[in-house]
Image (spheres, rainbow, N blue to C red):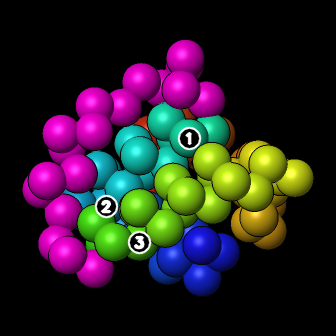
Amino acid sequence: GIPALLRLADVAERDSGQANTVRSFLLGLYNGYRFPFNLVRLRGLDKTLFDDCLLVLTLDARATAKEVHQYLDDGGDRFERWAQGGAA
């Protein structure tokens, strides 16, 4: 799950429709009350990104030692930047 999270975080830094969906998905894991995410949006992702999202969802559901943002360097800052306006 962690390699998939790293790949998704890289995608989330881009400026595209798929990147926006990935950002929204990750923000939903970060704080689902603050950033609700409709799972139907995953249908718009290509297979690789879709599969990575499922791996990260499994990581988040099973490995409860850390919250999703804590696996990334400066994760809290990155997620808050995404929340404020998106890509780098």
Determine the residue positioned at 74% across, 66% down. Answer: 72
Q: Residue at x 14, y 53 (%)?
A: 43
Classify residue 4 as left or right of residue 14.
right
Identify residue type, mark 3.
Asp
Placement of 35 over or under 74, stated as above or below: above
Query: Amino acid under label 1?
Result: Leu
Using a 10 Å C-alpha cutoff, classify the residue at mark 1 as few (fewer than 14 neighbours), some (14 to 19) or many (20 or more).
Answer: many
Pointers 1 and 2 in contact (CB under 8 A)? no
Label 3–label 2 contact, CB within 8 A: no
- The picture places residue 41, in percent across and down from the top left corner, at 19, 43
Q: Residue 79: x, y in percent?
A: 62, 46
Tell me the SS state at disc 2.
helix
Q: Which mark is residue 29?
A: 1
Residue on which the image places disc 3: 52
Mark 1: which secondary structure?
helix
Which sits in the foreground, 75 or 45?
A: 45
Of marks 1 and 2, which one's residue comes earlier in the chain?
2
Q: Is residue 39 magenta?
A: yes
Q: Earlier in the sequence, mark 3 or mark 2?
A: 2
Q: Which residue is mark 2?
A: 19
Q: Is residue 83 visible?
A: yes
In terms of sequence position, does the residue under pointer 1 or pointer 3 come before the other? 1
* Residue nearest the observer in this picture, 19 or 56: 56
Determine the secondary structure under disc 3.
helix
* Residue shown at the point (28%, 66%) measured from the top left: 50
Q: Nearer the viewer, mark 1 or mark 2?
A: 1
- Which residue corresponds to the image point at 63% horizontal and 60% vertical from the top-left? 59
Q: Residue furthest top?
A: 33
Classify 10 Å Cα crowding around label 2: few (below 14), some (14-19), many (20 and above): many
Amino acid, disc 2: Ala
Q: Could you tell me residue 68's position as x and y percent?
A: 69, 52
What range of the chain is rendered magenta? 31-48
